[in-house]
Structure formats: structure tokens, C-alpha cells
Amino acid sequence: MNIGIMGTGYVGLVHGAVLSSYGFNVTCMDVDEHKIKQLAAGISPIYEPGLEQLIQRGIESGTLSFTSNAQQVVQTSDVIFIAVGTPSKKDGSADLSYVRSVVQTISNHLNGYKVVVCKSTLPIGSSSRIAEQLNGALQASGASFRVDVASNPEFLRQGQAVSDALSPSRIVIGTNSDAAKQMLQRIYATQIERKVPVLYTNAETAEMVKYAANSFLAVKISFINELALLAEKVGANIDDIAEGMGLDSRISPHFLQAGPGYGGSCFPKDTEAVVDIGKRNGEDLLVVQAAIQANKKQKQKMITKIASRLSFNGKLRGRTVAVWGLSFKPDTDDIRDAPSRDIIQGLVDLGATVKVYCPQGMRQARRLWSELNGAIHYCDSEAESAANADAIVLMTEWAQFRNVDLAAIASNMRGNRAMFDLRNMFAMNTDVQQLFSYYGVGTYSEPKVYSLQEAK
């Protein structure tokens, strides 16, 4: 079977590389010529553990190739996956311009029966409209064949995308076509044999499953973050609260880690999009709206927390802050809608000098944060960023931060040597808390305050 992937972002690239490892002939297409040249050389443009090795094996075996020739992909593929981005517009609705472009491209080059599979996260009803557009164009041209369209949303966790694609938690297939269903069953035969749960439904339901899942997780994160703010004021410990809640099997401990707010390529845009879909259909999704507002509040609360301990008369001029971690989570270089962006902007606006270090996120930050880059300093290590700094803000829980010589780090800082641990990585580490004026999220404590003489 020949498979075409339209789009080589986090979803399309991972999906294509994994399918090629199962022996399918996969061609990934992108309009970015530079990216295609990189990929053809076996170089992944994104950081995702195990992905580059998978790409290289696919190229070596001859099952994976890359091209910017859309006509070639459409006409030689039996199944075509749409895997382009659907970012948010200013009003919160999904920007479908990339999807429309791909659909038009497919329509222009159809030469026989195909199954078109929507892997991108699309507003509910999109797959049916795509089917109408494609088959309407075919009918108008007098073609003797048709195409089937299915919704097959992805559930990949960045940082674990390869393992999730190889061993998914579930497979959702939305289509009313038996032929399309059978084609997707062939594609996912390995996972089905391994008893991965499969939900067969219509396209609208499949599309809504994706939004429902991401919105629920965003609600869960915002809920625990609001409780963390309350815990700080009443003398409770949010980590213990989360553990107590998570022991209830109806709740589970997953996504109950307090922090600076959710981010990434899915939760922010998908919550905004489903709220927009609700409004367009006469239903206000009040719970999801509250989660969005709580997430905005959480990021502002983190800025306030930092400023209240470091500021002079509400300003941070003369203060240097080291930010550790830019990506929205560890083991990925994705900085899209990462809370680090808003928090850094807030610190800069208050006059702070900000030095940043991230194991993988700085390349993307330099590329995407053009309006902020002139105000921050990129560093090559944790130690360089913290040298002569007044505070460390730990934004992302990269495992390597646990292995840093924090005593040496602290000795090269100044002032009260504050650590704002926005992921509670060191909330149980009393040795670390002796080195810094330590502030976690959702933990009540009276941090040690150093005198200026002690700090020298």
C-alpha cells in the first residue's frame, strides 16, 4: 500500500515515519523545500526522542521518502493523510487555510479512487465538508470514480510521540464508508492485533472526541492550578492534595501536577476552537471557558509571585532572572503557546534582565520569538544563565536539571538567591531548599531569606 502524508510537522512526520517502519511505502510532502532537503538527508527539523533514527531507518529501507511534489503524492498514493496545522485565529476559531490549500491540491490531482484521512484536528463537520468538496469537483469534471474521507484524530504526546504512535492508547476511526474503514484497518493492523482499543464511529463524533479529550485535560490542569493558588494561602500542600485526589480511581493522578499553566500546540488552540464551535452552535461551553481564563490567570499569578519577592517598588529593574526551560514540556523543542513566553514577557515588561537556557527549545525560540529576542539573553548552560542572577525560574521539568550542581550554581548567584520552582521539581528536596530562597507552586513555606552579607 502506498501512503501519502500531506504535512511534515509533529503529527505528519511522526505518523509517516512510524507507518514506514511497518513496511508501508510512505511519501511525506511539504511545501518547505529546505525542510524536505533536510528530511531527505535523514535530519529531523524537530526534536522528538527516537524520531530521527526512525526517519533514517525508513530512508535506508526504501519505505520512506520526502518530496515537495504534491501531484506525485496524490496520484501515487492509495491513502492520503492530511496532517497540516490548524492554528488559532485571533477570535479563537481554527485557521483552516492550510487544510483548504491541501484539499484543493488533492482535488486538482485526483486520478482514481483514494481514501483521504483527516489527521489534523478539525472543527466538527469538516471531514464531511471535505468529502462534499472533493466528490463535488469529481462529479463536475465527469470523473467515473469517487473518494472516501475519514476522520482519524491523533493522540500523540510530544516528547513521547514515537512511542505513542507505535503503541497508541486508542484508535478512533470516523467514517460511514466500509471501504475506508477496511483500508484503515489494514494500516492499523499491527496495533489492532495487539488489542489496542478501536472506536468506529462517524466523522463528526471522531472529530469531537479529539476536542473533548484535550478540553477535559485542560480543565483538569486549570482546576489543580487554581487549587494550588488557594493552598498557598491556607497553608496546604498541593502535591499532597493531588496525591489524595489521584488515589480515587474515578479521578486518577494524571494531569494533576500544579504548574505555571498549560501550553503547547494542542490545549490552547483546541480549547479556544471548541468554545468557538459551541458558540456557533448556540451552546456556551462554560467549563472550558473557565479553564481558559484560569490558565491566563495562572501565568499572571506566576509573574506576580516572582515580582513580589524580587521587585523594587513593583519593578524589576536591576534584577537578573535566569529562566530554565522554554519548551512547554520536557523532551520536546515545541515552544508554541508555552507559558514561558508569557512569563518571560511579563518579567521583561517589569524591567528585569532575563537570561534563558533550555536543552532543546532555544533554536525554536530564536526562530519564533522575533519580537522578544532583543530583550533576552540565550545561554549555553544552566550555570551560565544563573551567573550573577538574583533568581532562577524553573519553567520546564527537564530531567537534566536534577543533575546540575546546584551548590555551585547558588555560589555564583547574588542577593537572596531565589528559586521559583514552577514545576515543584525540588519541592521534597530539603538540600536544595537550603541553598535558595525557595518558592514552589501550591506549597506554603517561609523561605529562608539571606542577608546581603550571607549572599557574598
Image: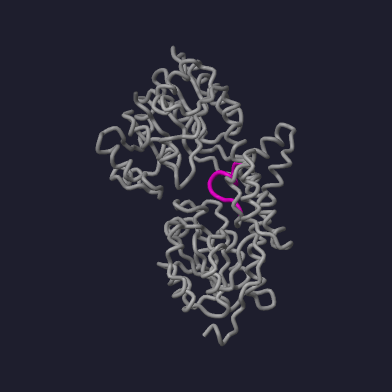
User: Position of 402 compared to 256: left or right?
Assistant: left
For image coordinates 47% across by 29% down, the residue present is 196
Q: Which residue appears farthest toward the top when viewing the image?
A: 144
x, y (%) of residue 335? 50, 53
User: Position of 220 compared to 353: left or right?
Assistant: right
207 lies above or below 389: above
Residue 252 image-quadrant placement: top right
Residue 341 image-quadrant placement: bottom right
Total tally of numbered discs in the picture: 0
x, y (%) of residue 314? 68, 74
Write down the region rendered in magenta.
261-270
Q: Nearer the viewer, residue 161 or 369?
A: 161
The reply to whether the magenta stretch includes residue 230 is: no
Rendering colour mode: one colour
Q: Nearer the viewer, residue 334 or 404?
A: 404
x, y (%) of residue 297? 68, 56
Quadrant where the N terminus sits is: top left
User: Position of 273 compared to 405: left or right?
Assistant: right
x, y (%) of residue 395? 54, 60
Q: Nearer the viewer, residue 40 or 212?
A: 212
360 lies above or below 157: below
User: Position of 371 compared to 219: left or right?
Assistant: left
For image coordinates 54% across by 40% down, the residue present is 86
For image coordinates 69% across by 54% down, the residue present is 226
The reply to whether the magenta stretch includes residue 266 is: yes
191 lies above or below 290: above
137 lies above or below 452: above
Q: Which residue appears farthest toward the bottom when viewing the image?
A: 453
What predominant SS class does the magenta segment belong to? loop
